[in-house]
Amino acid sequence: GGLEFWVRNAGSNYYRALYINEDGNVIIPNDGSALKLGAGSDLQLWHGSDNHSYISNTTGALNIKSTVTDGNIVFAADRGDGGGTFDYFSLDGGSATYSGGTTTAYTKWPDKSRIALGSGKDLLLYHATNNSFIVNSTGYLAIKNEVTSGYTYIHGDTVQLRTYTGNETLLSAAANGAVTLYYDNAVKLATYANGVDVTGTLQADNLTMLDNEYIRLGDSNDLQIYHDGSNSIISDTGT
């Protein structure tokens, strides 16, 4: 047995509004009937006739808090095959650290769990096994720094710009190495320790060089053209 509470509605009909079963569970059996807490019924919990469940707070802040040491708050839902649930993300209390009056806290997202933004899930942020991704599937992707005179940094020992398929490289930059520009996936300009190496034809509207700066031609720099500050010189040391 259990304990049942019956009430009379506006039509003078009695219905079971709440009961406590033999296992100690408190049950509100009618869809749309809410558990209301607070002097103004400010916090409400109910299951609707639309087959959805709701928690509603109408004043102040709604706090969800776990005070268990190293405890987590886990958000789980259908895992996609109808056979159970999957932890979509969690507030990872076990990883939190405290130092110098400051807490470092973590929101933990499992591999392949995606943060999806936009009504069509057009912007995705996720980690898959060994790699991390920011994926945009519509319009353009803008990285914008609105700080006046602010810097925007991309950190990495090797930085590449590639086509969206990843099959062609547009630019590649390596720490302590070359910055390389490509045309149709072929190298056209690359920096190296002594300057710049150009593959193909170099076109320019003007070429400005200072005094005692040389144009050198030939495998052994046999032909040199320069201005020494007073005179213009064409020097040929070949045979």
Image (spheres, grey):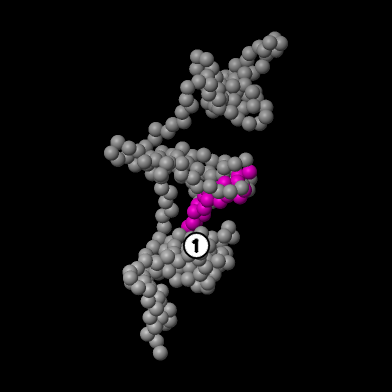
Report the side of 40 relative to 229 (left or right): right
Foreground residue among 28 and 136: 136
Residue 123 inside the magenta-drawn segment: yes
Foreground residue among 87 and 127: 127
Foreground residue among 211 and 23: 211
Dividing the image into 4 quarters, which one contains the C terminus?
A: bottom left
Which residue lies most toward the bottom here? 239
Q: Position of residue 30 (x, y in %)?
A: 65, 23
Which residue lies most toward the left here? 100
Dividing the image into 4 quarters, which one contains the N terminus?
A: top right
Q: Position of residue 176 (x, y in %)?
A: 37, 65
**Residue at the (64%, 23%) spot, across then down:** 32
Work out whether residue 22 can be spotted. Answer: no
Which secondary structure class fits the magenta region best?
strand
Residue 85 inside the magenta-drawn segment: no
**Residue at the (50%, 66%) spot, across then down:** 204
* Residues shaded magenta: 120-138
Find disc 1 in the rendering and name its residue. 171
**Residue at the (53%, 21%) spot, across then down:** 58
Q: Position of residue 45 (x, y in %)?
A: 56, 25
Report the side of 9 relative to 142 (left or right): right
Foreground residue among 103 and 48: 103
Q: Position of residue 147 (x, y in %)?
A: 43, 41
In this view, 58 is above or below 92? above
Within 10 Å of disc 1 (Cα), the crowding (few <14, some 14-19, many 20+) is some
Type of amino acid at the residue the image marks with label 1 = Leu
**Residue at the (54%, 17%) spot, across then down:** 41
